[in-house]
Amino acid sequence: MVTIESTRSKLIKLLADAKESYISGQQLSEQLHISRTAIWKHMKELEKDGYVIEAKPKTGYRIKHFSENVSANTLKWGLNTSWLGKEIIHKSTVSSTQLVAHEAARTNAAHGTVIIADEQSSGRGRMDRVWHSKKGKGIWMSVILRPEIPPYMAPQLTLMTATAIADVLDQYDGINPKIKWPNDILIENKKVAGILTEMQAEQDRIQYVVIGMGLNVNQADNELPDAIHYRATSLRKETANEWQIITLVQQILQAMEAQYDTFLKRGFSEIKTKWESYGFRIGEKISYHQGRENKQAIFSGIAADGALLVELANGNKEKIYSAEIDWFVE
Ligand code: BTX
């Protein structure tokens, strides 16, 4: 089935590939198998979504400016996935994309549905901590998954998502992402992204999982709140560039879909290896509290079930599921 969206995605790709040159209406109509009038109508729709298109009589069309307006359309056009983000719900302001996602999942939203907002008034982290989500400055997004895996494996999805985001950031020069177990992404020891996985499950079956991710993109130094200023960063702060939110969202969804498909087909081991290649402080000494005990051990990797693995001074290995970890012990 050829949908309007896939036609429009192909149209954008053709125009993008042509760079500065014009492509004639005739050529576009032949390649997309639609009439020249239909091409013209698609161009008008693209303009409504913020693209600037130049139409030159007897010559053709070219894109002068790609849209920077985040909308369900602009996110979908050019998105190269087969199931993730086929349904995108974009809102300008929400309390939390997690809440919208839970609501959508309860009312049967499909596997792979994405909820994204420009701004969250009550963005949340783990254990009801606050997640600052300044308008238009970052990616505040939740993904609904319906994985056919037992509930105990759900934490692996958090590690998978962190690895996908790290993979995307790692492609860019000057960005060296690290993942702080289990779910924070750091650049130069400062948090640039966090992931929050929430699940609705019965004893042995997952109904759905909502994976929320927050990525600081275009905040300037003074746009990160005082409370987190010294522990947080944004891509703009790290590179002194403005970043394209649409492109980053598309890259993250593409990476996440690929990792998820690998995970279902071949299990967790490839993701685990990749995660470990980004692991913050792997091979180094960390200090942690378990109950009243304060322990020190070498962080040696993650276990197949996603737990943190440490090696004690006596050579014994131990799994840690939740502990207060002091990452910065010398
Ligand atoms: P977390 O509990 O690991 O991190 C929360 C902590 O991170 C806060 O207590 C604060 O110290 C710090 N923090 C808050 N906002 C920021 C920020 N913008 N950048 C860096 N550090 C910050 C991590 O939880 C999981 C966060 C998930 C956020 C996404 S956004 C889309 C989705 N909707 C939603 O409400 N939450 C998720």
Image (cartoon, rainbow, N blue to C red):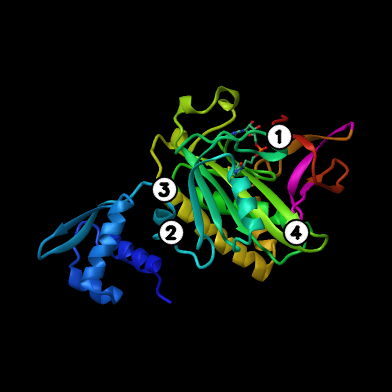
Residue 281 found in image quarter: top right
Disc 1 versus disc 4: distance between alpha carbons?
25 Å
Looking at the rendered structure, the number of numbered marks drawn on it comes to 4
Mark 2 residue crowding within 10 angstroms, few (<14) / some (14–19) / many (20+): many
Q: Earlier in the sequence, mark 2 or mark 3?
A: 3
Q: What secondary structure is marked by label 2?
A: helix
At label 2, which amino acid type do we have? Lys
Disc 4 versus disc 3: distance between alpha carbons?
33 Å
| Viewer-nearest residue: 191 or 286 | 191
At label 1, which amino acid type do we have? Trp
Q: Earlier in the sequence, mark 1 or mark 4?
A: 4
Q: Earlier in the sequence, mark 2 or mark 1?
A: 2
Mark 4 residue crowding within 10 angstroms, few (<14) / some (14–19) / many (20+): some
Where residue 141 sits: x, y (%)?
A: 55, 48
Let me know if residue 87 appears in the view.
Answer: yes
- The quarter of the image holding the N terminus is bottom left
Q: Residue at x 65, y 62 (%)?
A: 270
Question: Image quadrant of ligand 1?
Answer: top right
Residue, disc 4: 153
Q: What secondary structure is marked by label 1?
A: loop
Q: Specify the farthest residue to the top.
A: 226
Residue, disc 3: 70
Range shown magenta: 292-309
Left or right, residue 293 beside residue 298: right
Q: Residue at x 59, y 48 (%)?
A: 100
Residue 267 found in image quarter: bottom right
Q: Earlier in the sequence, mark 1 or mark 3?
A: 3
Let me know if residue 304 appears in the view.
Answer: no
Q: What secondary structure is marked by label 3?
A: loop
